Amino acid sequence: MSRILAVFIALIWGGTAAAQVLTGLARVDAGASSLRDAGGGVELVLGLSQPVPYRVFTLDAPRRLVLDFSTVDWTGLDAEAFDGSEAVAGVTMGAFRPGWSRMVLELDAPLIVAEAGMETGEDVTVTVRLQPASAEDFALAAGAPASALFSLPEPAKDMEAPHRRQDGSRPVVVVLDPGHGGIDPGAERDGYREADLMLTFARELREVLQRAGGFEVFMTRDDDIFVPLEMRVSLARMAGADVFISVHADALAEGRAQGATIYTLAEEATDVASEKLAERHDRGDLLAGVDLTEQDDRVAHVLMDMARTETAPRADRLADELVAALTQSIGTLHKRPRMEASFSVLKAADIPSVLVELGFLSSDRDREKLLSEDWRGRAAEGIRDALIAWSRADAEEAELLRQ
């Protein structure tokens, strides 16, 4: 997975820029920014209010161009402003971690960095020019510098010393995972972002669980920040989680869907829609700046499968409890409230994990509910009731297994 760095720019100044004081956020000038096909390649231009440290690199599998800035305010700049190139499938930008912003271009063709620079003075402009390359040359040139992986944890180890299963003798440790955040806003409709709505709901759910007693609650994020998928699982393991609940509210480009759905892990998705949903949720890997080339470790897979023989039935029981309790608290759920898919955040072999799609932002009815404090309160109470019922039954089973 190690690659040769294509281009790394820690800090580029020119002329009088060296004397400038770098304070506050650099703002992007939408009118001075563009993306276009040029000379058989692609040219990206960003107009900034002031010079800032930045770096540029490419990644493979899938092919991406990544630009990191310290720090840029993207307000007023829409990704749709960068639709001038047929070689770029999509553009994402936003906060990446405290002190850093990120822009990711998804490339439809192998394009390597031919030139990258910052012009300073009265106007500040960052220009990146890409040129066509063979797939082999692109792969050789692609790779993130070590400094660009600062937010990624060491790979989570599923087979460390096992966490003692909860047996009712202590508070149940619940880790709540508000989906998306920062550079990854998730679904967006009518000015509302999935990342914001799910953070609000997770905070409210945390309060409901804490008031109930018997729970110790942690969150994978408590702000609008980007948390890579693997880190979410690692944070749950570090907290000693007894259960992991990821909350989302997606949107569909086509078709109709509404109502809450509870997902558990399966390599084969329940249906095509669930498979596509998992792909959209797992885009966090793409934004994190990691090479997605999979490594085949058969021993690790066998060991994790063995661990899941114990946790998978527990996750299934929790999902069933959630369906029952949410039906009582909020009424009608999705027409198929229990689904399965290969979500990365559900892959901790040693933690019963579920993903709750509270509704769909693409549904006017669901969106209205998600914006209702009363509805969210009833949904949180339903999840609380499910966790109480599940934890009692789970503790009883743990006691039987010890006898």
Image (cartoon, rainbow, N blue to C red):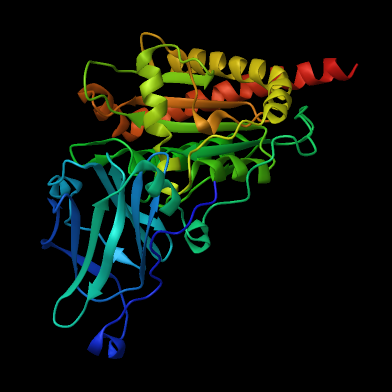
Of residues 52 and 86, the one nearer the viewer is 86
Estimate the x, y position of residue 66 in percent, counting from the top left: 35, 54
Viewer-proximal residue among 388 and 126:
126
Say if residue 38 shows up in the picture. yes
- Residue 71: image location, x then y, percent: 34, 67
Quadrant showing the C terminus: top right
* Residue 376 in view here: no
Residue at point 23%, 59% (across, down): 129
Taking the image as shown, residue 360 lies to the left or right of residue 160, namely left
Hey, which quadrant is residue 12 in on the image?
bottom left
Q: Is residue 121 left or right of residue 395?
A: left
Q: Point out residue 264 in the picture as x, y percentages from the top left corner.
A: 53, 20
* Residue 303 in which image quadrant: top right
Residue 380 is situated, as x and y percent measured from the top left of the image, at 46, 30
Whether 108 is drawn above or below 343: the answer is below
The residue at 35%/47% (across/down) is: 64
